[in-house]
Amino acid sequence: MDASLPTTSGHSGAADNILSLRGLTTEFRGRHTRIRANDDLRLAIKRGSTLGIVGESGSGKSVMCRSILRLWPPSIDVHVSGIVEYEGRDLLRLGEEDMRRLRGTELRMVFQNPMTSLNPVWPIGDQVTEGLRLYGGLTKAAARKKAVEMLGRVGIPSPERRVDEYPYQWSGGMLQRAAIAMAMTGSPKLLFADEPTTALDVTIQDQILALLLELQERTGMTLVLVSHDLAVVAETCDRIAVMYAGRIVETAPTREIFSAPRHPYTVGLLRSIPHLSAGARLKPIPGQPPDLAELGPGCPFAPRCIYASPDCATTPVHLAAAGPDHLTACLYPERIGQAAA
Amino acid sequence: MLFLNYIANRLLQMMPVIFGISLVGFFAIHLVPGDPIQIMMHGHASPESVAAARAQLGLDRPLLEQYGRFVMLAVTGDFGQSIVQRQAVGAIVGERVLPTVFLLSYSTVLAILIALPLALISARYSDHLVDHAIRIGGMVGFAMPPFWVGLLLMLFFGLYLRWLPVSGLGNDFADRVRHLLLPSATIALFLAPILVQSLRSAMLEVMTADYIEVARAKGLTPRRILLKHVLRNALIPVITILAVNIGWLLSGAVIVEYVFSYPGLGSLLVRAVSYRDYPVIQGLSIVFGVLVVIVNLMADLSYILVDRRVLKK
Amino acid sequence: MTSLANTAPLSRRLLQQLIEEVRHWPISLKIGTSVLTLIVLAGVFAPWLTPYDPYYQDLLNALQAPSWAHPFGTDMFGRDIFARVLYGIRIDMQIGFFTTYVPLTYGVMLGALAGYHGGWFDAVLMRIIDVAVAFPFLVLIIVIIAILGPGVHNIYVAVFLVAWAMYARLARSEMLVERTKDYVLAARVLGFGSGRIVLAHALPNIISSSIVFSMSDFVLNILLVSGLSFLGLGVQPPAPEWGAMIAEGRDFILDAWWICTLPGLVVVLTGTALSLVGDGLARRLGHNRKSLM
């Protein structure tokens, strides 16, 4: 299956993008329903950058990662369409075996729950280097040495002693480091981290984020950090993409997202970050996230948007430029900052 | 050291069970309404022989002393004499243990061979037509009385088609496999529906686990994921399920051995009950109980091989 | 259909509620209950469904193959097998019912109390349950029958002695979870006695897994009764019990296959219907089967 694409020109800096999504749509089909967990996603990830994907549960951010890596098992009735361009090839049209090879080497992922990410009945070392043995042709002895080395690199103390231990003997933070080690084998070019710190203690969170950044600096890989926590993403990422109801609603450099947000949902997110000043009240976004099975043709955020006008719910809206490096899927971004419509 | 700890722990937990079994065995004679001796001898005996038998069985001593004597003798394998066959119970029971164990093992293997693929398919295609069909098939199989199935299999394969022998042990191993196919298949058909549902749940539990998705994300082939991760992890509940259902295996064996006139513990039990041969019944209760305990211990031991977490406690 | 003031008579309202409930039933429950009801009705109305007496021997017509006159044929004594099967429904269903639901009642209560109170009562009960559940059920029953003698009454005694254990275990597990729930704590604060809390408040919520299990148990008990009767240890001849009939037909299996086969088919039908009801009940009560979805 030929998945190579004609080299694109047009978008600025397009040649320097390691991954580019065009119209990525993920649809789950149930007996009576169709749910578009990702709707026509458009995204460009620059090589070597750190991209943060922010959104609440159900926004489609985790689904997007899985669709890009084609991780859906055959038993789930899911349809992924669009173009996922990676190094000149369309991942969605790649043969299964080639895709597996990429997953074992260049395109990696770290998952949310470290306690369940590792097989409980296998020694940790074996799991870390399983991919290497398969794709790198390492012998058992060489693999063990490599496992010790990798575990050391992610900050596990006394790795030679601990490499044969089982997951139940390690803490959550250590297991996440092991998962990161597992993902770093094979020298990945692009690493997805899906809520890597959500299941960990706050004190450990910083350590894990620091580790990811350090590894990125050392290897020059591209890092995509998915989180529902704007604060986590703010500290670590160059660029942020905000997702809502299965769509990307805003992308911009991190500084601009905070200083000049151009989408009402982003504004709402920023406002809802709790401040430590006494007496300050939490300002949640009014309303509930929409039912993905019942979306109308217009902007999905319209029902909760304080700047919305009646045509917002009926007019389809797509990502459009709101600045030199800034995209927003809002019809009236200029209304932000003014009094509510 | 963890191993010894674990095994010792398990053995200790078995103590109450063994105690309970010994009580059951002991009271087998003492709870009989009326005079057990008279019943055993079917009323044909003179008062002298009744008294002699009573003395021989020690039934004229205080209860506690009897229990003590019972336990001490039981440990050495001496269960007295069969009233009916005038042979040591230990010998009668002893020669039937291996045939029954062989039958049980054979049945287990067949049951797994039937149940595992069905459970895999059921789990992989859960909620699809295949899954429902297997489930309903299981219900029908579950409702089939083992003695009825045994008779029909005997009739069809043994007498009608003349493919397989219907009784006896066979001469060497290969011949034995042929002879035991029908009775083992009967027990297996009874056990399989129970296994399929339990295995299906266990497999779904594993298949939807996070680490399986992680394995896919590592680029592993589906075959490797299935063999090295799914099956390996599903093995743990499989062992548990098999151990838990040993009771049903034994129950099935009793009926099937009777139907096929198979010289095992089950048919001996039926015969002993019909003849009210209480010493034999006592011995058999103990043996069955010990079998259950041994199977559970074996399961506990095999956990060590498969899942290190058990040593944690 | 609902009005603010439903002034229809009580019976009408109950009927409406019943119809509404049945509409939500899964297919397995509908089919299972229908078949089961038919079987039970067939047993109840047996005298009207067959002209023959199940005990009447007509030796001239012995070993007749199934025909219009004798839908299931006749046995070695010339008795009509269809009639015997119909009357057998009464025996097997009755024994199956009582051997299942009587132990359920006190088993669930014991387990609930043990789960609620804990302590030594719970510890002792757990040990007894472990022994009872681990031991092969049939062997245990046979041994008890060996002590007491064969016959229907002794089957009841034997099963009542042993079968409660599984229900106790199920109820106990559920109670361990349930007793941490708010409504239980609230009842305690209000000063209700533990007996009342367990029986009146918690029990209805923990009983569902036992009810679901009872359908499988029903099947197993029918197999037990027929098995014991087959071995000669249960219902004694000439009673028309299904297992006994199969045993009687054993010697004639080559020449008169219908004596053995047909009663067995009825057992399978009954058992399958019961399992369908159990499966449907499980769904209805929210014990959803796991799936990959």
Image: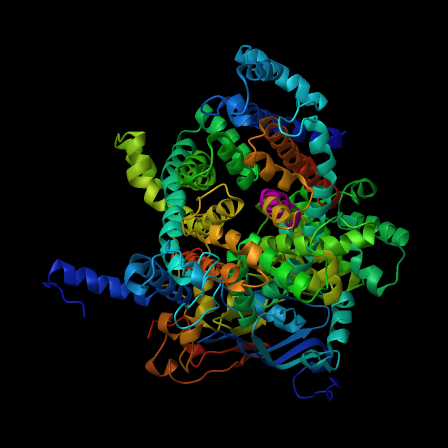
Q: Main secondary structure of the magenta part?
A: helix
Q: Position of residue A14 (x, y in %)?
A: 69, 82
Q: Quadrant of the C terminus of chain A?
A: bottom left
The answer to whether residue C127 is above or below residue B189 is: above
Q: Is residue C141 left or right of residue B3?
A: left
Give the magenta range. B238-252
Residue drawn at x 68%, y 56% as measured from the top left: B182
Q: Position of residue A110 (x, y in %)?
A: 67, 59
Name the one closer to the observer, C38 or A299. C38
Q: Would residue C48 be counted in the magenta stretch? A: no
Residue drawn at x 73%, y 87% as measured from the top left: A7
Q: Is residue B63 left or right of residue B288?
A: left
Q: Position of residue A263 (x, y in %)?
A: 47, 73
The answer to whether residue A184 is above or below residue C161 is: below
Residue B194 visible to an observer of this rendering: no
Residue A73 visible to an observer of this rendering: yes
Q: Quadrant of residue C54?
A: bottom left
